[in-house]
Every structure is written in structure tokens, then in C-alpha cells.
Image (cartoon, rainbow, N blue to C red):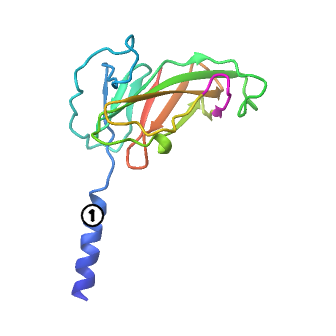
């Protein structure tokens, strides 16, 4: 019985160490080594900030960068008007469409798999609809090696293009971050 209790206690402690962190916001733009020359703003490595004790997601303005504790950074551009083609999927029920440029920089020391990255939008009090259009949206599928970056375009149908909240989570092990106007 003591052995079972000891095993359970160790399991609980191990799981407690797997909690996620919110990261921190920054006005600087971290870039990877494959960034186009006009995008590279600095060669400095971002300094990780202490993990916040709050479980609330970090809230940033469009154009700001969030860097998580493991040095994965995400920057979300301000939304731009998007005109979906007739073949686009996810446009039903919306008359306003926006597109974001999302840049992921990996300075974690290991390859980052972006296939677990999730993003979602709320506008007014309504969830937006992710728009998939071969003529203006894209995804990340290839692992991002340490020191490199990847950029993709995410489009959404929204209720009000002046009231947008975009939530991005790099993976299941990370806390989300929220960008607003």
C-alpha cells in the first residue's frame, strides 16, 4: 500500500511540473536566420522573462510579439481586409473578412513542430470562421529549426472588423496569448 501511495505521489508531482506558462509580450521583433533581410530588426537574442504566476493569457496589441518561456516567439500583424475567392471555404454567414500575417520564431534550442499551433478569432460576441483559400491563406507544416522562423497567413470571417480578438497557442504544452486592436 505504501508503494502505491509513493508511486501516486510521484506521478502527481511529475504532472504538476508540466504546467504551461503564458510568456511575455515585447515590442521588439525576434527573427530567425532565414528572415528576409528587410525583416531582420536585430541580432540580439531575446532574454526570457520570469514566468507570470497568473493563468490568464498574455494580452497584446496587433504588431507585438509574445515570447514563451522556451523562446518560441509569435508576432501577429494588424488585420487587413481580405477578399476571398469564390472557391474559399469557411466564408458562409460572414460579409467581413480579415487576414493576419503570423510569424513564428524558434530560438528554443530544438526543432519546433508548428502542426499543433492553434488560432481562433472572436468578433463582437461571435466566433469567427477560419477561411481557407489557396489564393491568400497558408499554413505552417514543416518543423522550424532552432534559430529559424516561419510565416503564414490566417484569414477569418468576422462579425465586425473593428472588434477582433485573436487567440494563438503554439502547442498543447503552451499557454495561449491574445492579440487585440
- The residue pinned by badge 1 equals 14
Q: Is residue 110 in the magenta section? A: no
The residue positioned farthest toward the bottom in the image shown: 1
Q: Residue 106 at what x, y percent from top left?
A: 34, 34
Q: Is residue 136 in the magenta section? A: yes
Could you tell me which secondary element the residue under label 1 belongs to?
helix
Q: Is residue 95 left or right of residue 142?
A: right
The residue positioned farthest toward the right in the image shown: 86
User: Few, some or many C-alpha atoms within 10 Å of disc 1 (few <14, some 14-19, many ≥20)?
Assistant: few
- Where are the magenta residues, as a range? 129-137
How many numbered discs? 1
Q: Residue 46 at what x, y percent from top left?
A: 24, 27
The residue positioned farthest toward the top in the image shown: 38
Q: Is residue 174 left or right of residue 116?
A: left
Q: Main secondary structure of the magenta part?
A: loop
The quarter of the picture where residue 175 lies is: top left
Residue drawn at the location 26% of the way across and 77% of the way down: 7
Residue drawn at the location 36% of the way across and 25% of the way down: 65
155 versus 170 height, above or below: above
94 versus 9 height, above or below: above
Q: Is residue 4 left or right of residue 156?
A: left
Q: Residue 63 at what x, y percent from top left?
A: 42, 19
User: Which image quarter is the N terminus in?
Assistant: bottom left
Q: Residue 10 at what x, y percent from top left?
A: 24, 71
- Please state which of residues 66 and 147 is positioned toward the viewer in this rendering: 147
The quarter of the picture where residue 111 lies is: top left
Residue drawn at the location 72% of the way across and 27% of the way down: 94
Amino acid at each position: 500500500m505504501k508503494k502505491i501511495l509513493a508511486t501516486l505521489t510521484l506521478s502527481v508531482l511529475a504532472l504538476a511540473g508540466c504546467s504551461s506558462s503564458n510568456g511575455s509580450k515585447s515590442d521588439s521583433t525576434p527573427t530567425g536566420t532565414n528572415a528576409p533581410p528587410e525583416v531582420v530588426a536585430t541580432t540580439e537574442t531575446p532574454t526570457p522573462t520570469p514566468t507570470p504566476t497568473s493563468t490568464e493569457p498574455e494580452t497584446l496589441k496587433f504588431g507585438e510579439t509574445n515570447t514563451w518561456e522556451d523562446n518560441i516567439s509569435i508576432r501577429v500583424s494588424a488585420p487587413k481586409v481580405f477578399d476571398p475567392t469564390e472557391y474559399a471555404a469557411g466564408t458562409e454567414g460572414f460579409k467581413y473578412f480579415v487576414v493576419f500575417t503570423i510569424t513564428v520564431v524558434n530560438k528554443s534550442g530544438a526543432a519546433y513542430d508548428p502542426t499543433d499551433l492553434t488560432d481562433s478569432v472572436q468578433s463582437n460576441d461571435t466566433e469567427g470562421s477560419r477561411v481557407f483559400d489557396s489564393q491568400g491563406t497558408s499554413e505552417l507544416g514543416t518543423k522550424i529549426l532552432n534559430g529559424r522562423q516561419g510565416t503564414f497567413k490566417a484569414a477569418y470571417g468576422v462579425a465586425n472588423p473593428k472588434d477582433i480578438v485573436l487567440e494563438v497557442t503554439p502547442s498543447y504544452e503552451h499557454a495561449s496569448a491574445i492579440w487585440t486592436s
